[in-house]
Image (cartoon, rainbow, N blue to C red):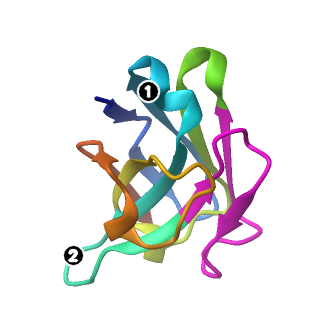
Amino acid sequence: QVQLVESGGGAVQAGGSLRLTCAASGRTFSAYAAGWFRLAPGKEREFVAFIAWNGARTYYADSVKGRFTIFRDNAKNTVYLQMNSLKPEDTAVYYCAANVARYGSAIADEYDYWGQGTQVTVSS
């Protein structure tokens, strides 16, 4: 069993930066791929980024490519999402997820564990 807790959300002006943290419990987390998704009011859940179990592969949604970076520290059981050049359309609740398949996926239904989410609000 893996439990995920996100933190680092907040309110920021357009052009600013935030770093989200996903802290995991459970010794097996380092063997899982991890992803970030987001949910904005009135919209469907959207894939943001994923990272393979060993960090060797990452993949981003086109909407965040070049602005967001996903990385992990398996020694700390933690995955991060560095968000730069934030835009108002990035406003959403951001969720961390873990996928027992080691190489990651952009499909939410393929993830096995989810955190409770952290709110990110970007003002213009």
Decide whether residue 63 is among the magenta residues: yes
Residue 31: % across, % down = 57, 34
Residue at screen point 53% across, 22% down: 77
Judge left or right: residue 76 versus residue 11: right
Q: Amino acid at mark 1?
A: Ala
**41 or 36: which is nearer to us?**
36
Quarter the N terminus occupies: top left
Residue 37: % across, % down = 41, 62
Residue 43: % across, % down = 26, 83
Mark 2 residue element: loop
Provide the residue span drawn in magenta: 49-72
Q: Amino acid at mark 2?
A: Pro
Residue 59: % across, % down = 68, 66
Label drawn at residue 23: 1
Residue at screen point 45% across, 46% down: 100
Q: Quadrant of residue 41?
A: bottom left
**CB contact under 8 Å: marks 2 and 1:** no
Judge left or right: residue 57 versus residue 28: right
Mark 1 residue element: strand
Residue at screen point 38% across, 44% down: 10
* Circle 2 residues within 10 Å: few <14, some 14–19, many ≥20: few
Residue 124 seen by the camera = no
Residue 36 seen by the camera = yes
* Circle 1 residues within 10 Å: few <14, some 14–19, many ≥20: some
Residue at screen point 34% across, 33% down: 4
Q: Quadrant of residue 8?
A: top left
Judge left or right: residue 35 versus residue 43: right
Q: Would you place residue 89 above or below residue 79 in this image? A: below
Label drawn at residue 41: 2
> What separation in Å lies between label 2 and label 1 (alpha carbons)?
25 Å
Q: Would you place residue 87 above or below residue 20 in this image? A: below
Discs 2/1, front? 1
